Amino acid sequence: MSEATITRRYRFCAAHRLHTDQLSSEENWTTFGKCNNPNGHGHNYVVFVSVRGDMDSVTHQVVDLSKLDEVVQRIVVRRFDHQDLNKDPEFTTQTTTGENLVLLIWNLLVNEVPGGRLVKVGVIETRDNYFEYSGSAKQVRREDGVRHG
């Protein structure tokens, strides 16, 4: 069987404030600048999800795109779209940096991707900021076809 990788693009809009209680107000401002604004600020995020797997002998696809879209919409887009990331339970103990966001999205998806294995998640936050994570979580296929690690 031939392996291939597909990458799909998704979008959501969200607000956040870069701030950590581990730094003083002055240190937060020095570290995060205008992104430390107490009122927060927003982004139009673009998320790339890359899945690798064997090409189906009938459809010649790696993954059923409608199933992948359903998973990403349900797990990522609905969760974050038009929300304040700082209020998400996963960010109660960490800063809402792009690095932490791309890692969180990976962790949310790694065991839920249908019919393939997650190989990379990318997040565009601004014109100049792109974050990428290719995790090393071991995945095993269950009888129901869902990968778990």
Image (cartoon, rainbow, N blue to C red):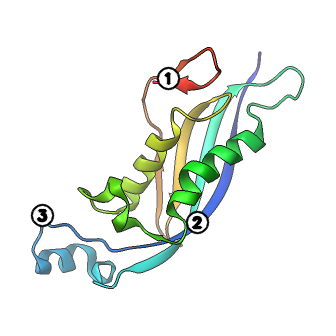
Residue 106 at x, y = what percent? 47, 43
Q: Is residue 144 left or right of residue 95?
A: right
Q: Is residue 73 left or right of residue 23?
A: right
Pointer 2 residue: 12
**Which circle marks residue 22 in the picture?**
3
Pointer 1 residue: 139
Q: Nearer the viewer, residue 141 or 2?
A: 141
Instruction: Answer above or below: position of 83 versus 76.
Output: below
User: What whole-number distance in Å separates the C-alpha atoms at marks 1 and 3?
Assistant: 34 Å
Instruction: Indicate which disc, 1 or 3, sits on the residue closer to the N terminus.
Output: 3
Residue type (three-letter) at the residue carrying disc 2: Phe
User: What whole-number distance in Å separates the C-alpha atoms at marks 1 and 2?
Assistant: 27 Å
Residue that protrudes farthest toward the right in the picture? 58
Q: Quadrant of the C terminus?
A: top left
Residue type (three-letter) at the residue carrying disc 1: Gln
Q: Is residue 35 left or right of residue 64?
A: left
Instruction: Indicate which disc, 1 or 2, sits on the residue closer to the N terminus.
Output: 2
